[in-house]
Amino acid sequence: MTDDTQPRSIGSQAIVLAAATGVAQVIVAVMYIVAARIAGPADYGLTIAAIAVGTALVGYADFGTNSLWVRDLANGGLDVRALSSRARGKLLVATVGGLVLLVGLLFTPFAYYWIAVPILLSQLLRQTSVVPLRAAAQSGRVALVAVAERVLGLVVLVGLFAVGVAAESALWMALTAGSLFASGLARRLTPPSLRFAIGPRLRPSSPYVGARHYGLFTIGVSSQSLDLALLSGVGGAAAAGLYGAVNRWTQPMGLLANAFSTAAIPFVAKSPDTRAALRAVSRGAWLLGLAIAACVIVFFSAPWIVPILVGNQYVGAVSVLQILALGTIPGILNQPLATFLQAIGRDRVVSFVVMGSVVLQLGLILLLAGPFGALGAAGSMLIVQTTLLFLLGLVVVWVSKHPNESKVVGPKETV
């Protein structure tokens, strides 16, 4: 593929993304903290459980296509018009499915979960809109989109509070508005040669061609968002509120790893062999150390920061945050390991390992949430992330000893 600008190194790209995701996560953390303080644990628990379901549905609808398209655009296996046709097909599938789900939920005891639908559609559109920028290794523009999404969301949240909208409703509305705004901005920032084609003559095509193993991986990762819904059902809304009040506080560290992984995809995809890909990835790996150090700081500061930020009504979340901080440490390493293996064509084994780990995590929540509440959900995350690190580490060791000497290139397709 071609682009109007030259991509920088993995390290510099990751720093840009890390800084942007850090700012974005601070903003979204403020949004969640304010909503939690106003709504209280029970009402807040219901809202974030529904938002979590919507986030999981994004992964199901995407089915790994965004990551696959980034790889194939980067290595020349897919052109922009074919990408546009597939993207239109994916959004069509998600819209129809979302409408069916919306109507169905209105006739069930879970009608409140209807807010998962606007979360699904807005976030899916935003994530898809940055695919060309990610493939072109334009992390600066991706970073700008991420920050703009959260800034607009915060502005909308404040405006909704000002006109008297309840905190639990204002939160999902602000998140949806931010994602829609970011989608439009991403298109504006994309160079014309890489911009999605639109218009009545562009026919939608199947978005899931070649995405089976990427899709299984994405479903596995997205299903982790169901922890809140399961916890709410088994442990109660208050337990979900305690867990949900702090479970996002370790995400900035996880997103630092995600920024490193995102920046690495086009470089790894273009590498001629596995050893070259490992060398490319190693140049920015020091960023992961910073993320791990931040987790250690969060662990020791939890007894002070939880009451200060969300109030004494959430004091039971201190231990939850500490366990989540420990579980995030292996999670920081899992993200780049999985992304590296996918980018060199080992997506099948990654999908199986991740799917198995998610099944284990959700099963543990069902077992532990009843007797231990939010602590059970946090402990499940720690156990599973540690197990996943061990398994992915074994795969990387095996691959490094049996390097794949051919570059992974997807089938060239035009529409």
Image (cartoon, grey):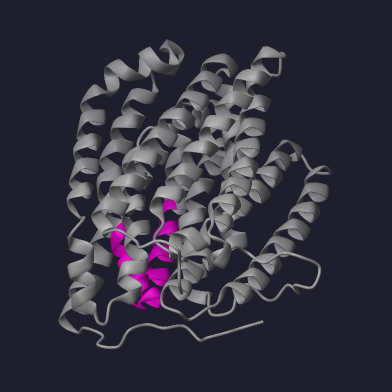
How far across and how far down the image is residue 10, in percent?
Answer: 27, 58
Q: Residue at x 22, y 67 (%)?
A: 280
Q: Is residue 385 above or below residue 86?
A: above
Q: Is residue 42 above or below residue 65?
A: above
User: Is 69 in front, or is 326?
Assistant: 69
Q: Is residue 219 visible?
A: no
Q: Residue at x 28, y 77 (%)?
A: 271
How far across and how far down the image is residue 218, in percent?
Answer: 49, 62
How far across and how far down the image is residue 249, in percent?
Answer: 38, 32
Magenta residues? 336-361
Q: Is residue 311 left or right of residue 276?
A: right
Q: Residue at x 62, y 64 (%)?
A: 196
Q: Is residue 265 left or right of residue 198?
A: left
Q: Is residue 3 magenta?
A: no
User: Is 312 in front, or is 172?
Assistant: 172
Q: Which quadrant of the view contains residue 8?
A: bottom left
User: Is 181 in front, or is 254?
Assistant: 181
Q: Is residue 395 left or right of residue 166?
A: left
Q: Is residue 340 magenta?
A: yes
Q: Is residue 28 above or below residue 99?
A: above
Magenta-highlighted stretch: main secondary structure? helix
Q: Which quadrant of the view contains residue 270?
A: bottom left
Q: Is residue 2 left or right of residue 278?
A: right
How far across and how far down the image is residue 47, in percent?
Answer: 62, 31
Q: Is residue 131 visible?
A: yes
Q: Is residue 100 above or below residue 64?
A: above
User: Is 210 in front, or is 248?
Assistant: 210
- Image mark count: 0
